[in-house]
Image (tube, helix red, strand yellow):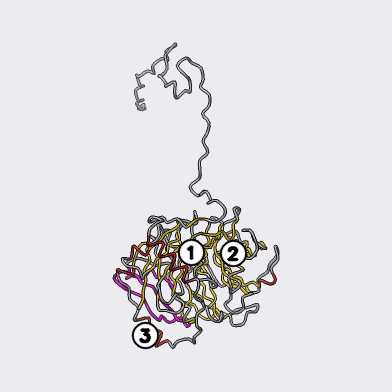
Amino acid sequence: MIKKRQPPESKRKKPKKRENEIGCRRSMRLLKVDPSGVPLPPTPIQPTLLEDETPMLPPGPLEMTLENRDDNNELFKGFLQTWAEMSKTSSKNTEKGLSSIKSYKDNLNGMVISEDTVYKVTKGPVFSLAVHPSVTRTLIAAGAKSGQVGLWDLTQQPKEDGVYVFYPHTQPVSCLYFSPANPAHILSLSYDGTLRCGDFSKAIFEEVYRNERSSFSSFDFLAEDASTLIVGHWDGNMSLVDRRTPGTSYEKLINSSLTKIRTVHVHPVHRQYFITAGLRDIHIYDARHLNPRGNQPLVSLTEHEKSIASAYFSPLTGNRVVTTCADCKLRIFDSSCISSQIPLLTTIRHNTITGRWLTRFQATWDPKQEDCVIVGSMAHPRRVEIFHETGKKVHSFLGECLASVCSINAMHPTQYILAGGNSSGKIHVFMN
């Protein structure tokens, strides 16, 4: 028998561990010991703010302090004087019937964009936009993620002289409206739990509502004179606020059946009804029958398959509702008769996937043509699109000066002026 050869044993021997061996030297500072060998006292831990934590501004009115120029600037004084004169004029629009689609398209075709109507107004992404109803001056207001509120008067040249930026909030300004009762007032709502009214005749931002325990998402006017408001919270609650009552608290805090509320919008005719957009559902409530708990909606729309961005009544009659959803669909419902069910009229295929760095799309109605909706687009070349309630595309706003995605858009209530805001704080204006 042939024996298998065994591998040779390793001749390398492990070194013996020495006794009384001196260890590696270590810094006495790292050992928290002073040179004499006495342990140092523990260092106190300094409290640090988390990235998401932002200190709130102090309660009460804030002075209108400009962030982009000197407060004593003569241009700013003239700007305040212009707003004071606007407070004496009526902001009510003369009601007209709907234009025919042909004449509407002709007016849209005459709207153009140029280098003079594009400017970076705020720092960071635009979260909200409003166009002033004035017919003599073109005034655009933008709410930014940084908490800024920027105002741009396009009638002033050069264009940088017409931009005025303020810091009334510390977190994103998600909702912005000019007061229907006083054109010199602008109301802004922020994630920081404050709702303020910028009064340009007094040059202050008054505090309308404050809740340090909750974060706000949206609001709208329950009364035409802007005296009462409905405020939506990110935690699913709603607040009824009466501006005639002293203080900055709510009249009633209501727990809705939604886990989150993204947008709130009041019916333009029957103002006791308002619509809320949640994560997956859309509810319509009656403000006359709200209780602190156990509120059931009059109508619940459950057709949406993914996250909802917004829901709005049509501006003149409220007979339609448009919703924007992350399933790449715009839906239009028939709300002419608010009952237990509202039928779905039209589904419009539209790319609503904006990604992480762009503000989400929110389709809104044209206040002049309530059968048409305005929405941003991810298509190339960059554009803003208008669709009819039947689903047909009416118009696309294009131009060499539009080189980015305008997620948030707003149209002038009576003039053919469209403002679009992108995610860098730049405003693009199409006008005749």
- Residue 21 percent across, percent down from the top left: 42, 13
Residue at the top extreme of this rendering: 20
Contact (Cβ within 8 Å) of mark 1 with mark 3: no
Q: CA distance from mark 1 to mark 3?
A: 37 Å
**Residue ID for mark 3:** 106
Tell me the kind of residue under disc 1: Phe
Left or right of residue 135: residue 194? right
Q: Is residue 96 above or below residue 420?
A: below
Q: Nearer the viewer, residue 344 or 18?
A: 344
Examine the structure image and report whether residue 368 is included in the region drawn in magenta.
no
Assign the N terminus to one quadrant of the image: top left
Residue 212, horizontal then vertical, whole percent: 59, 53
Please determine whether, in this image, residue 392 is positioned above or below residue 150: below
Q: Amino acid at mark 3?
A: Asp
- SS at circle 3: helix
Which residue is identified by label 1? 200
- Say which amino acid is labelled 2: Val
Where does residue 332 sit, x and y in percent of width and height?
Answer: 52, 78
Per the image, is 380 magenta? Answer: yes
Dot in front, 1 or 3? 1
Q: Which residues are magenta?
A: 375-402
Instruction: Give neighbour class at mark 3: few <14, some 14-19, many 20+ (Cα, 10 Å).
Output: few
Q: Secondary structure at mark 1?
A: loop
Q: Quadrant of residue 253?
A: bottom right
* Picture quadrant of residue 136: bottom left
